[in-house]
Amino acid sequence: MKNILIIGNGVSGITAARHLRKLGDDKITVISKETDHFFSRTALMYIYMGHMKYEHTKPYEDWFWKKNNISLMRAEVSDIDFDLKRVKLNGKKFKDSAFKTNLTELSYDILILATGSASNKFGWPGQDLNQVHGMYSFQDLEQLEKASPFLKRGVIVGGGLIGIELAEMMHSRHKEVTMLVREPSYWNNVLPPEESEMVNQQIIMNHIDLRLGTELKEILSDDNNNARAVVTGDGEEISCQFVGLTAGVHPNVKWLKDSELAINRGILVDEYLRTNKPDVYAIGDCVELQNPPKGRRAIEPIWYVGRIMGETLAHTIARSPIKYNPGHWFNSAKFLDLEYQVYGNVPANIVSPLSSYFWKSEDGLKSLRLVYEIATNHVVGVNLMGLRFRQEICEEWFDNHFTLEEVVKDLDRAHFDPEFYKKYYKEIETHLAHN
Amino acid sequence: MDTTSLSLANPKPPFTSPGQKWATAIGSIGLLLLLLAWLNIGPIFNSIYFWSSILLLAIGVVWYSIDMYKNTPAGIKNNGVWFDSLTNKGLWAWVLGVFVTGFYVVLYWNPHLMGYNAEGSNTGLVHFFDPLSMLLKGQPASQWFVYGTLYTFAIFFFGIKYIIKYRHNRYQIIRTISVMFFQLAFAFLLPEILEGLNSDKAYFGKDFKNIWPLNYYFYHDWHLNGMLDGGKLGMFALVWGILLTFVVTPILTYFYGKRWYCSWVCGCGGLAETAGDPFRHLSDKSLKAWKIERYLIYSVLVFAVVMTALVLYSFFTGSGQFLFINTFQVREWYGFLIGAAFSGVVGVGFYPLMGSRVWCRFGCPMAAILGLQQKFFSRFRITTNGGQCISCGNCSTYCEMGIDVRWYAQRGQDIVRASCVGCGVCSAVCPRGVLRLENSGKISDRAKAIRNEVITADVHSAE
């Protein structure tokens, strides 16, 4: 029986723990400094919006962990001794924790690092003032809640997935929201121009003050070190009571920088998710892959990647070594009321040897983009706004090298919208034929 | 960990617009007229006041709903649901719960308090509804007529509110039109009109979508005799009633799941889906609640079957005694405990505290039968979409039946649960498009296997 220690109780660490338990009877301990129990980070926004309470965001009831013999611990790790295989705790106490521990050290046979991300800060003047926060952790949400009674206008810096979620959160509580987006169009380093424009429209339709092509210059302080306004690149001063820094995230590895662990931007791992230290693995947002699979990035801080890594690693540890193989890229999001799904390869800037076919509904709220190789006509990517497709059918198209024409004839099979929803597939077939 | 709410101050902004205030005022006047009638304030008993009351209530509800949603783009807007006193078990929830519970206690056991008079003409609230009753069947109203009218009214006008709320979702719109139609036409207008046309004959149920065992008195001797003496309509009611339970129901459930009844046709479901919608998230999702649910609902089913067997025994033998059991007492106890206390008082009265489907989930013997059929002999499934679930919990939170939908969705497993009424709200609130209600032979085996929790291709083949 091995003694497995997991640092981080997000989706990566918890998925690893659950699968390790399914596959064996090793001793499993999960440490977190964030919350006692696993919750869905992606659901933080819904707590603030009043759609759910914190307890609803916990995918497993609290009895689950004891019943499955997974020990949970609330503590902050200060240091790791990789030679003696020991983890040192800094003794920090957590007022909101139901767990009590006086341990100062934990030993391990196998260590899994799943420490997640931290919000980016680019050295803006005033970035460490009060009421300036990212929106990543449970503590970030607590800070926003604390600021909310006095919050009339919030300024969001950065146009990514978290930025638009934070905008929706504040908007739902009738706060004025200004979004500063450095790029000329929302998230246009990921979305092709047409889709990006659809999101711009969605933001404007919701009366959110969207400032495209606008950078943050500095955050101004009042006498008590609270943020009182931001200054944009054009010198405009926008008064506010909260600043959300949502210009991306980076692997949360700062506390390990001085250790013997090989770290570049993230913790470097091979295709078995092994670090440079024996019996030490890393998974999820904190990871940087030394040899990412074809078409994938070295750092992919998304929910699905963390989960797949957790599953893979559990198998490697409890059964036999298995390479990390995430399969076709997929992701999804919701921009206010606009749902988004992507399967396969959809670059923001589609250039030769790729091209794409794009269809948009008359009301401008639904779109389909099929990315294909010009030489073969094989479809390699599907981008959807306001439509739901079956993942397994899209992957079937890629695996079996369906051509653009074949996919367009087969769209009905991928249909995943609720019953009675209008199907646009005939319209799309005709549209393609005329283009 | 503070699990109640993170909020320091009441985070709910003043959502009430001037329009909503006017709407509330108008609806309140309608309600006030009902109250004055209840209190027997003399001049109120004029048909003009009755119609005004109904009209003002309707305008109030519809205007409020339109005003509430008109300035927001269509989409899921459950903003502030857990901050609002009414929808988060606060003071207003208790006030409403006590009021509705009280109404049911009066209706079932003290109808004289609302003006019903067994010996002579009615007064109060019951008398107030005479204009409509006279119009439909040429008889004065009874307490049951008052109840039926208010019930239909609630489904119809809160149904309009629901349709506006889900105006972006055609499944919700069509389903809601269906429950509104079946309540208005089949549960209310048709039975009342037929009753008027057959007033010379003994009473029997004329709601032809009310199915045994939900309609628990179908096989009671007085009801069987009523149908047998009821001419052609009575014979139709008898044959159709038997066919419904034993032929129509299994066939439809095989093809569509229990939803064809529970969230498309049934009156109990209709009220839960419309007037009860603001409380759907209050259902208990714990494993413990699921255990209680299974014990309770199948106990009620056994009780209903045994009770029915006993009354049929009495009907055919003429004996009210089976071994040591008095069949009339069993029947009375069923009517009191299940028919009135459980389905009415608890089932509707506790909406604001335990969610809108307490009766359907824990008590309804019809739902129990349909659930067994759905679980073992149906093509209905909720399909999950690959590995797209982010475990956010919206589906579980807004499941009125307390199903932990996320448990299945996050491991890519299709969902087949006896209790699922197929309302489709899990699919509607999912921010990632993971869930889809389906009837298909092709997918019938997928739910039995945990499909693709392991998403990595390598691991999958190694398993």
Image (tube, coloured by chain):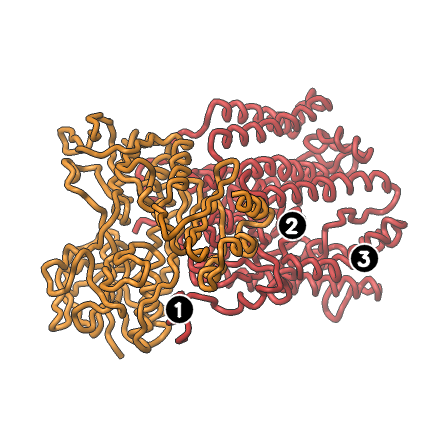
Chain colours: A orange, B red
Question: Callout 2: helix, strand or loop?
Answer: helix
Which mark is drawn over residue B457? Answer: 1
Residue at which label 3 appears: B221
* Left or right for B210, reference B139: left
Question: Callout 3: helix, strand or loop?
Answer: helix
Chain for disc number 1: B
What residue type is disc 2 on?
Ala
**Disc 3 to disc 1, C-alpha distance:** 64 Å
**Disc 2 to disc 1, C-alpha distance:** 55 Å
Instruction: Please state the horizontal and vertical placement of residue B56, each as a whole percent of the image.
Output: 62, 25
The residue drawn where x is 58% and y is 43% is: B170
Does residue B93 appear in the picture of this structure? no
Which mark is drawn over residue B340? Answer: 2
The residue drawn where x is 90% and y is 50% is: B231
Task: Say whether mark 1 and mark 2 are on the same chain.
Answer: yes
Question: Tags 2 and 1 in contact by the CB under 8 Å rule?
Answer: no
Q: Which callout, 2 or 3, points at the residue further toward the start of the chain?
A: 3
Mark in the foreground, 2 or 1 = 1
Question: Callout 1: helix, strand or loop?
Answer: helix
Instruction: Please state the horizontal and vertical placement of residue B171, each as a whole percent of the image.
Output: 59, 46
Task: Say whether mark 1 and mark 3 are on the same chain.
Answer: yes
